[in-house]
Amino acid sequence: MSKTIVVYYSVQGHVKKIAEKIAELKGADLFAIEAKQPYTEADLNYMDEGSRATREFNNPELRDIELVSTEVPGWADYDTVILCYPIWWAIAAWGTNSFVKAVDWNGKKVLPVAISHSSPAGESGYLLEDDANGGEWSEAVRLYQDATDDEIQGAL
Ligand SMILES: Cc1cc2nc3c(=O)[nH]c(=O)nc-3n(C[C@H](O)[C@H](O)[C@H](O)COP(=O)(O)O)c2cc1C
């Protein structure tokens, strides 16, 4: 029997809500990617050249985010992964990449779900796939950060 998990990275809460809805709709389990050093509001101020997020964006060497855990209980048993993440400057918020690099994707079907205020999924799904060691990645789906339940259901 096919087994699905929704893995999500949510810094400000929008992705979490959507991921929980997707898990409910699909009867899937959930796993949260969490940064060891959480972002403060000041860290996320993209208008500030000196903020943590802006500095990380401008310097890829700073984008390796230490995560609380990459040990997903029962990971080997899942054949489908729905990977939900926020868009930052038109790409996946890079904590997502840190997770993608840490786990084994072989034998998994992956659906990337990009969540944003207004940007499309763009290249975000392909860039995550590039960081994965395998898996069968579908084209990313994009959802508005405050998507309704109907919009979520319609997109998946
Ligand atoms: C640092 C930063 C950069 C962002 N860049 C974009 C962007 O390029 N395009 C966009 O549509 N939204 C952008 N957003 C908005 C987020 O993608 C959107 O609010 C998302 O739902 C956040 O998910 P979260 O609340 O789960 O962290 C940005 C937000 C932050 C904090």
Image (spheres, grey):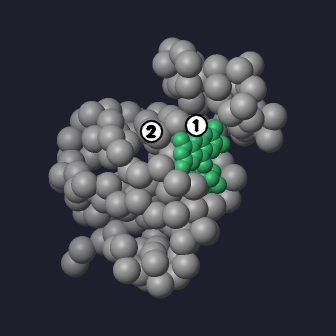
Query: Residue 19 in the image: x percent, y percent?
Result: 52, 67
C-beta proximity under 8 Å, tags 1 and 2? no
Left or right: 44, with 139 as reference point = right
At horizontal 21% and vertical 41% (from top left) the residue drawn is 134
Q: Which mark is residue 77?
A: none
Could you tell me the amino acid type at mark 2? Ile
Mark 2, secondary structure of its residue: strand
Mark 1, secondary structure of its residue: loop
**Which residue is tagged 2?**
91
Could you tell me the amino acid type at mark 1? Leu
At horizontal 38% and vertical 34% (from top left) the residue drawn is 101
Query: Residue 61 in the image: x percent, y percent?
Result: 51, 15
Give the crowd class for mark 2: few <14, some 14-19, many >=20 residues within 10 Å.
many
Which callout, 1 or 2, points at the residue further toward the start of the chain?
A: 1
Left or right: 128, with 51 as reference point = left
Left or right: 7, with 68 as reference point = left
Query: Residue 78 in the image: x percent, y percent?
Result: 31, 63
Query: Residue 36 in the image: x percent, y percent?
Result: 67, 36
Q: Quadrant of the C terminus?
A: bottom left
Q: Quadrant of the N terminus?
A: bottom left
**Which residue is tagged 1?**
67
Left or right: 43, with 1 as reference point = right
Q: How many marks?
A: 2
At horizontal 34% and vertical 69% (from top left) the residue drawn is 4
